Image (cartoon, rainbow, N blue to C red):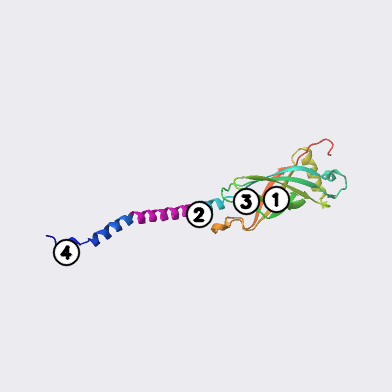
């Protein structure tokens, strides 16, 4: 015959152990999820930093030039040339745009600035490219007799070269929402280019 204690005894400790064991897989799964999220965020931040440090590629060409015939006139001391430049920008970034607030372009020959003009502000989308048209002009640019003679000879031989320099300004050109910000300040794009239309019989 069972006693009252035996008939109504409930193993409370065992029930708690069972419930605790059931909760353990949930806690482990939650910890694993949190760890995975933390690792993913850390990896993303590293990739974003690498992407943020990627540098755009620039190319510059002279589309057209005018006003240099003055270098062939006897006694001409000044020229007023005009250049149309085409700049191409390729953005290697996969996460952020490549943006500039604009800048200044200068075309020079043998250290003498022939023409200058503003570079418009631009923003190239992720993994994209853009072309800019830059107009540079000069008025009453002085050339020495020696420099004018040298330029004329090189033009006739198709060897006249000019230097194109573009200074581009940046203001927070980076991935600010993750705390990085690259290329604040000024960068310089420099190219030495052959003048188009050289060697024309009527030029000199």
Residue 4 is tagged as 4
Residue density around tag 4, few if under 14, some if 14–19, many if 20 or more, within 10 Å: few
Numbered disc 1: secondary structure: strand
At which x and y percent is residue 54? 57, 50
Give how far apart the Cα atoms at labels 3 and 2 are.
18 Å
Verify CB contact (< 8 Å) between mark 3 and mark 1.
no
Residue density around tag 1, few if under 14, some if 14–19, many if 20 or more, within 10 Å: some
Q: Nearer the viewer, mark 1 or mark 2?
A: 2
Verify CB contact (< 8 Å) between mark 1 and mark 2.
no
Give how far apart the Cα atoms at labels 1 and 2 are.
35 Å
Asked whether the viewer can see residue 110, the reply is: no
At which x and y percent is residue 107? 74, 49
Label 2 sits on residue: 45
Give how far apart the Cα atoms at labels 3 and 4 are.
83 Å
Residue 98 is tagged as 3
Tell me which numbered mark, 3 or 2, is placed earlier along the sequence. 2
Quarter of the figure that contains the N terminus: bottom left
Q: Nearer the viewer, mark 4 or mark 2?
A: 4
Q: Which residues are magenta?
A: 25-44
Numbered disc 4: secondary structure: helix
From the viewer's side, name the closer residue of 98 and 189: 98
Q: Residue, x 76% and y 52% (percent of image)?
A: 116
Numbered disc 3: secondary structure: strand
| Residue 27 on the magenta span | yes
Tell me which numbered mark, 1 or 2, is placed earlier along the sequence. 2
Numbered disc 2: secondary structure: helix
Tell me which numbered mark, 3 or 4, is placed earlier along the sequence. 4
Tell me which numbered mark, 4 or 2, is placed earlier along the sequence. 4
Secondary structure predominantly adopted by residues drawn in magenta: helix
| Residue 183 on the magenta span | no
């Amino acid at each position: 015959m069972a006693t009252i204690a035996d008939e109504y005894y409930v193993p409370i400790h065992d029930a708690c152990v069972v419930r605790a064991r059931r909760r353990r897989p949930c806690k482990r799964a939650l910890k694993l999820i949190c760890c995975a999220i933390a690792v993913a965020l850390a990896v993303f931040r590293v990739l974003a930093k690498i992407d943020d440090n990627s540098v755009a590629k620039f190319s510059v060409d002279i589309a057209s030039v005018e006003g240099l015939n003055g270098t062939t006139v006897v006694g001409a001391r000044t020229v007023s040339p005009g250049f149309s430049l085409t700049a191409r920008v390729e953005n290697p970034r996969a996460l952020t745009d490549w943006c500039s607030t604009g800048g200044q372009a200068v075309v020079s020959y043998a250290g003498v600035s022939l023409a200058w003009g503003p570079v418009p502000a631009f923003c190239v989308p992720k993994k994209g490219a853009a072309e800019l048209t830059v107009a540079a002009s000069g008025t009453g640019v002085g050339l020495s007799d020696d420099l004018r003679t040298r330029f004329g000879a090189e033009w006739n031989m198709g060897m006249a070269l000019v230097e194109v320099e573009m200074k581009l300004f940046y203001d927070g050109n980076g991935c600010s929402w993750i705390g990085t910000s690259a290329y604040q300040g000024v960068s310089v794009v420099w190219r030495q280019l052959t003048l188009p239309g050289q060697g024309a019989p009527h030029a000199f």
